Image (spheres, rainbow, N blue to C red):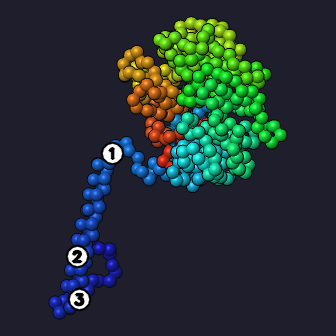
Amino acid sequence: MFTAPSSVPNPIARPNDPGAASTVSSKRGWFIVLSILAFLIVILLLLGYFFRPWGSTPREEKNSSQGYSGSATNTGNLSSAWAAGVGTAWTLDSVSAVRGEHQEVTTLVDGTTLYVAATPSLGEGLDVAAVDISGSQPQVIWDSSNPQVKRDSYRFSLRMVTIDDKLIVGNSTVDKTTGEVEDAPWLDDAPLTVVGDVLVTCSGAETCTGWTWESSEWKQQWKSITSLQDVHSSIWDIPGGPAVSSGDNMSILVPVQDKRSLQLIDVRTGTVTTLGESTRWDPSTYRRGVYRASDGVAIRDNNNMVRFYDASGTLINSFESAPTLPGVADGGQAPTLEELQAYLKSGKAPWATGMIEVSGPKCEDVTVSPTSAGSSRIVHKAKGLAVSSSDPCYTDIDEVRMSPDGAAVYVSNGNRTEIEHAYFLDTDGDVVHAATDMVKADQLTWAFDDLIIAVSKGQVTAFTPASA
């Protein structure tokens, strides 16, 4: 043992000195104990290092909240900051809509306000809250509950839309300023969409209705009979909404059953137009995809035959499309029918932010092609974005978002593969960030270019790009 130098000589231990032997023995004993403890600590640290799963993130680091520091804007595109991966901005579990047991929860972002609504029991009651999400942490504006609300939960999922100063939640209206909840006159309908000052509700059976708010009450403008509807039709949640034109001649798609021809409703008059020669499809065919244009709609069947209709429901063209098409990040902008025809024929999408294609020997290579940001680039090892793992790679992509510079891409797969995948791709660094927590969420809502709202397990979580 080394000791520090001293200007005073150490006293000489004498046999007749009763404290000499005990002092030396005590120091030696403490040294042995401390040495053993230090050795055990080193061993434990080494065991923790070698037996920790490689690539995992400590729970406290993964779940820690970093706050939101973005600009609170939504352009429909992705922020390039997502190239760094996913971080947690904040969590919220105090509002009534997620506190306790609920049958259904739904969210909607209007500007910088997040609305969270839920039904506490089947068919009865409504909890709804408004939250300001523009700052680093969420600020609850109001939190309302109305146990007297009645709704037909057996048929519809809880749906929410906004019109002027009102929030429409199922068959209830909510004042955006006060949070006051009131019954609406469409007891058996669900809100489909809002076009201008017209709210359109549909029954899920054979009727749709147009409503306007006039003189402090809802007034029915029209009620139309349609083909047999489906409460699970993709038209309810078609990207960009079911409107297929703009201006005075505005029509919307009707959520009819898959075996029925799609229909359009003129929002001003309620006139129903069937897209096709008959209201029923041939039993051997089914609808594979619906593409919304700014001036019409395209319908693709299982034989890759595509038919194009303008906003009046007139057939203007038809042809067989390519069997595989690149995924499109459109930034929320709908193409014209002319641009849509070019895409379905040649795979070109000049109106979009960019496109992605899946290729490679295992269908794990993603080629990212931004429209106005230079050459394409490839990101490797993105699994599960194709139906098979061998060439040809038939893609199974549900959603694509891209930053205008092509540096960051969000992509999630569809329902034709067994395992759900969602990734943020760093195209400059060839890095794939798995968005596992987002896949597990019950519901996702894009709030801003750099903020995503997720609801699951009794709380609201806001995801943002990981801190640098």
Q: Quadrant of residue 35?
A: bottom left
In three-dimensional space, the C-alpha distance between marks 1 and 3, rounded to whole angstroms, equals 54 Å
Residue drawn at point x = 67 percent, y = 42 percent: 172
- Left or right, 37 with reference to 145: left
Residue 206 at x, y percent in the picture: 62, 25
Viewer-closest of 398 and 286: 286
As drawn, 228 above or below 420:
above
User: Which of the two discs, 2 and 1, sits closer to the camera?
Assistant: 1
Residue 160 at x, y percent in the picture: 63, 38
The residue type indicated by label 3 comes to: Gly
Q: Which comes before the other along the chain, label 2 or label 1?
A: 2
The residue type indicated by label 1 comes to: Pro
In three-dimensional space, the C-alpha distance between marks 2 and 1, rounded to whole angstroms, equals 39 Å
- Left or right, 430 with reference to 231: left
User: Which of the two discs, 3 and 2, sits closer to the camera?
Assistant: 2
In three-dimensional space, the C-alpha distance between marks 3 and 2, rounded to whole angstroms, equals 16 Å
The residue where tag 1 is placed is: 53
Q: Residues within 10 Å of mark 1 (few under 14, many from 20)?
A: few
- Mark 2, secondary structure of its residue: helix
The residue where tag 2 is placed is: 29
Residue drawn at point x = 45 percent, y = 48 percent: 62
The answer to whether one can see residue 373 in this image is no
Q: Which comes before the other along the chain, label 3 or label 2?
A: 3
The residue where tag 3 is placed is: 19
